[in-house]
Image: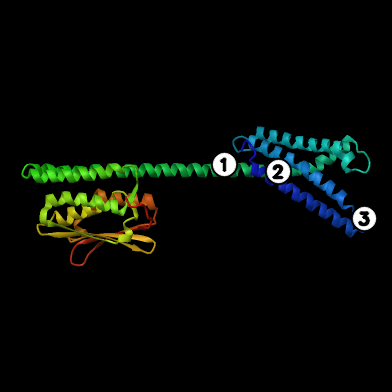
Amino acid sequence: MRTIPWLVVVAVVAWWGLNGLIWAAQVITMQSSLGEPVDVRQVLRLQMVSAALWVPCTLWLLWATARAPIERERWLAPTAWLLLAVLAVVVFRAVAVMVLDPWIGWYAAPPTWGDVLVTSVLNNTLMGCLIVGVGHALVYATRSRARERQTRILQERLTQARLDALSAQLNPHFLFNALNSIAEMVHHDADAADRMLVQLGGLLRHSLESSRDQHSTLEEEMAAIDYYIGIERVRLGERLRFRRSIDADTLRAQVPRLMLQPLVENAVAHAVAQRDTPSTVEVRAARDGGRLVFEVHDEGAGTQARPGFGMGLSNTRARLECLYAGAHSLDITPLRGGGTRVRVSLPLTLGQVP
């Protein structure tokens, strides 16, 4: 706070104006109670001018404090500087009284310089020190706000960097699995491998178009899921059955980009690919008051067959924590009769339908 903000200037003027009125009211009340004649105009003139002289003094002391505040590591030079600033105020007010007294009338007879200076020391030194204390409070408050703002910016940047790193892990992870599947398919079914490449191209295009966005709409995420399911259907054939139950009013809901895919991929890998018989994976989404709830169901062998749940699910947990800081839930429940349900609940935020 090397310069005095205009709001502080306004506050100082208002403060001393109010003080002048209060001082005048006290003098008038006291004289009235003693039965003395009261000259209201004279009292107001004396007190308001005295208060007005404190306005430049206060601004000077606030500026001096902001320029060199007393700190633990550096206190000797600032203390001397501020004592000189208070002394300057004492001398300034003494000079002002000497100059203005013929027009204002603080003294009944012309005072001597020594008397005015001694009175100024007695009356103004403590007030000057109190203003220096207020100046330190303003300095420290300004620094605290600046540190909070800087900490918030750094935390946002750190969170964004972490989210970018987590998102960057998802694409290579899936791409590695998809290319492995295509490599296996190309030797005995070139047409199927070609169809998988087309679906993979669509999925990668979708990913690249929003690579810097942490959120997308549920409709966009379901389009990405369709590309993924298209790839896996070529590889798994009739063993993979996919269903969706998406409420229409959730299509514009904002969800973390590429969050659904790892959940569906986990279900396909553990509940479908490990079985010889057809198995169903279902995605459901519904609105629950002010929250979006979506679930991924499968007909696998339950959670016991999935130690750790792989990088995709742990990555999803980390991203949700970064984005929602505890305002979310992710629950994994074994279903009666076999299978698993992954349930995610998020604050509902609506975006634009692409």
Q: From the image, tell me which residue sits under label 3.
A: 37
Dot 2 and dot 3 residues touching (CB under 8 Å): no
Between residues 124 and 350, which one lies in front from this camera angle? 350
Q: From the image, tell me which residue sits under label 2.
A: 131
Question: Seen in the image, is 37 located left or right of residue 1?
Answer: right
- Relative image position of residue 26 (x, y in whole percent): 82, 55
The label shown at residue 143 is 1
Mark nearer the N terminus (2 vs 1): 2
Q: Kindly identify the amino acid type of the residue bearing the numbered disc 3.
A: Pro
Answer whether residue 153 is visible to the viewer in this image. Answer: yes
Q: Residue at x 66, y 34 (%)?
A: 78
Q: Kindly identify the amino acid type of the residue bearing the numbered disc 2.
A: Ile
Where disc 3 sits, the SS reads loop
Between residues 294 and 2, which one lies in front from this camera angle? 294
Answer whether residue 133 is visible to the viewer in this image. Answer: no
Mark nearer the N terminus (2 vs 3): 3
Q: Residue at x 54, y 42 (%)?
A: 146
Mark 2 to mark 3 CA distance (whole Å): 35 Å
- Relative image position of residue 313 (x, y in whole percent): 27, 52
Mark 1 to mark 3 CA distance (whole Å): 52 Å
Q: Nearer the viewer, mark 2 or mark 3?
A: 3
Where disc 1 sits, the SS reads helix
Q: Residue at x 70, y 45 (%)?
A: 12
Q: Kindly identify the amino acid type of the residue bearing the numbered disc 1.
A: Arg
Mark 2 to mark 1 CA distance (whole Å): 18 Å
